[in-house]
Image (tube, grey):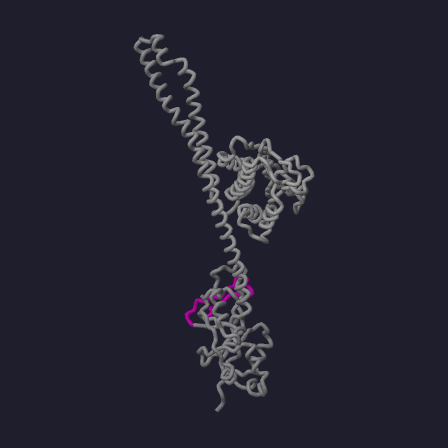
Amino acid sequence: MPKAPRSPLPLPSVTSPNNQDLSLDATVANLPLHSFTVETNYQGQEIATIFEQYPLLPGVVLLDKGKFLGMISRRRFLEYLLRPQGLKLFLRQPLRVLYSYAQIRNLIVPYTTTILTTTQLALRRPSELQGEPIVIQGPREAEQPDSSDPEFLPDFSESKDNYYLLDIQELYLADWQIRGIEAQVRYEQNQAQMIQMEKMANLGRLVDGVAHEILDPVNFIWGNLNYVHLYSEQLLELINAYETATVTAELKENIEFDFLQSDLPRTISSIRTGAERLKKLVTSLQNFCHLDDVYPKPADLHQCLDSILILLKSRLQKDIAIVTDYGYLPPVPCFVGQLSQVFINILGDAVDNLLNDKLSDTFDRYPEENKPVKIQNPTITITTKIYSGSQIRAATSDSRWVSIRIANNGSAFSAPRKQRILSSFTGERKHRKETSLALSHWIVTAKHGGKLELRSPIPELSPTPDTPLGTEFEIILPLV
């Protein structure tokens, strides 16, 4: 009795999804899936021909009368052919014979499984199965557009199951890409958390000074309100006296009209001054606590610096002078809240340096000469200007950059501390005491594409010990 004719051997196909934008929740459906499903009555010679024509095909899915039976990988197929008598046993025999020898436990996952989960399942397999492809179970693929289209994705819209093969190397490559994305997201989250923690720490240190600054204008207002109330009553009494035509010099003398006339404008001016100080203080605090948007926005850096100086006013005291040499700066695209953090870190460090100098009055920078150095006028100088790219060795000479220099004439950093700060800038070592400056360096460089430079001559190498060395930080930001 003649055998029933077999259907032609199906040719392999592969989906070509656009996996350029993989995300943490991407599934295996986003990866290239190989479709090559045959019945077990086909001979090994026919499959070997297909493997020769399609070198990237990872294996073949076997069906037994239309039902899923298992999978034979390319590697395992070739291994059995290379065994003694393998060509005679398997090449001219139906695939069911080879599968009876090469049968293994396949890893089968639904097409909705995430890439990260699939990788974990693949790595849990025994070592001899680590290189085997993975069987992806999904609804039967419907009519599709040209698979060369980069936007092509398998449309699992039919109800019948179909099986695909996923090359293990494709899975590991996608997992590596997603791990990189995950690491970057985690790094960004950690940096944002560090910024917030540093901001809260600075905010806590500022609360005491802010409370003191608030009390002063409140006392102006509260103390003068009594006088305004008294003056108002006396003026009303005087007006009533005019209306009844009983005004006398004695009444003016009793209410001290001349003094009232001169003191009332001063009292109102004092109240206005206190109210303005309160307004500036609250505005500065709001600017410092400002939450940055997703994208940088143009900001007035001079106003930002002035706001920080108001917040630090209680710590500056009368002995520390602030000199501002502001050049013309257009609005600079930036994350103003994060830059405020940088300014307060550097200015706070300068204030601490000068206050320490004030307490000690002398420095031990030149112990061999036993010659103390005393700063007569502790000063913090803030200078802003615009540079061209050629002046700062930028990538393009026609680019423009904004420079903010914050310098103090206090004692210079010691060589060990300067080295610690520079090390924290490069990320080679993390020093707990230099966290705020290292965070400032990250905000300027990573978030704004700028530079943060430290200039502090080493005291031991200074040729002129009679002059305080000082420290200067320069923040350089691109001006787009």
Residue farthest toward the left in the current orientation of the protein: 244
120 in relation to 320, above or below: below
1 in relation to 245, above or below: below
Q: Position of residue 383 (x, y in %)?
A: 60, 35
Left or right for 269, reference 330:
left
Q: Position of residue 420 (x, y in %)?
A: 59, 49
Q: Quadrant of the C terminus?
A: top right
Q: Position of residue 444 (x, y in %)?
A: 57, 46
Residue farthest toward the right in the current orientation of the protein: 463
Query: Residue at coordinates 55% horizontally, 33% vertically from top-left?
Result: 320
Left or right for 203, reference 357:
left
Taking the magenta stretch, the answer to whether it contains residue 18 is no
Q: Which residues are magenta?
A: 140-160
Q: How many marks?
A: 0
Left or right for 158, reference 449:
left
Predominant secondary structure, magenta span: loop
Left or right for 286, reference 444:
left
